[in-house]
Amino acid sequence: MTYRPGGQTRPPLRPPSRRRTLLIRGRQGDHEHGAAALSALFEVAQTDPPSFEGYQVVVYCPDPPVVRGAAAFVQATGIPVQLIPAPARGTLPRLLGCARVHLALTPTLPPLRAAMLHGAFPIHARTPEVEALIRDEIGGLLVPPHSPARVAQAIRRAITDDALVDQAARINRPVARATFRGDSSCE
């Protein structure tokens, strides 16, 4: 058990390699990043269905087109998707603590830092700010957000390479602690 202020205890986080949740930031933005994430997920589900066995998909902060895309994904693949429109304060850290992968193609740092802090393996859009936090192929996988094929490749690697996701958690946690600014919700 781990001590928290106020005398509360919580169990230590499970190693990311033992987690079976894919957490996706569903913000669409002006560049259809949420749709690209779902397209990549669909590609993995179609080409390698056993890779999703035992996994759950959770999409937080989905824009309306992403909600429709998630429904189409469920209908086409049979893989359930849980949608969380606007996580209450404190919900996202709990989700990240259960997630093996955090996929975010919109260039926002607060959710990335939160993912790093909670050990969720980041697959993130490549930007200079993100590159300052994560070393590609070591602390996460940085991808071009408009390439579902490259994002799908990153997803496949993240759900099959236990050593990579566990190593990233060990590397990322101290970086996140040094830069974390609080709850990230849907920022």
Image (tube, grey):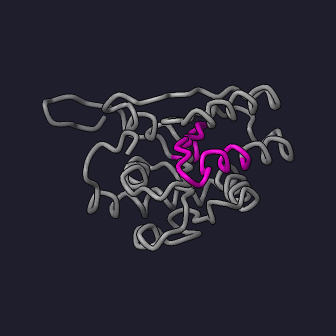
Q: Nearer the viewer, residue 163 or 66?
A: 66
Residue 17 on image: x %, y % = 58, 47
Residue in view at x 40 percent, y 46 percent: 118
- Residue 85: image location, x then y, percent: 48, 28
Q: Which residues are magenta?
A: 16-40
Residue name at image x 15 percent, y 30 percent: 7
Q: Position of residue 78 (x, y in %)?
A: 79, 26
Q: Is residue 60 left or right of residue 163?
A: left
- Decide: is 128 above or below 76: below
**Going by the image, does 97 lie left or right of 123?**
left
Image quarter where the N terminus lies is top left
Q: Relative to residue 20, is residue 139 depicted above or below?
A: below
Residue 34 among those drawn in magenta: yes
Residue 125 higher or lower than 98, as above or below: below
- The residue at 43%/64% (across/down) is 171
Residue at 43% x, 39% y: name it.
97
Q: Quadrant of residue 69?
A: top right
Give the camera-side residue of 122 and 186. Answer: 186
- The residue lying toward the viewer, choosing from 5 and 186, is 186
Q: Position of residue 175 (x, y in %)?
A: 34, 64
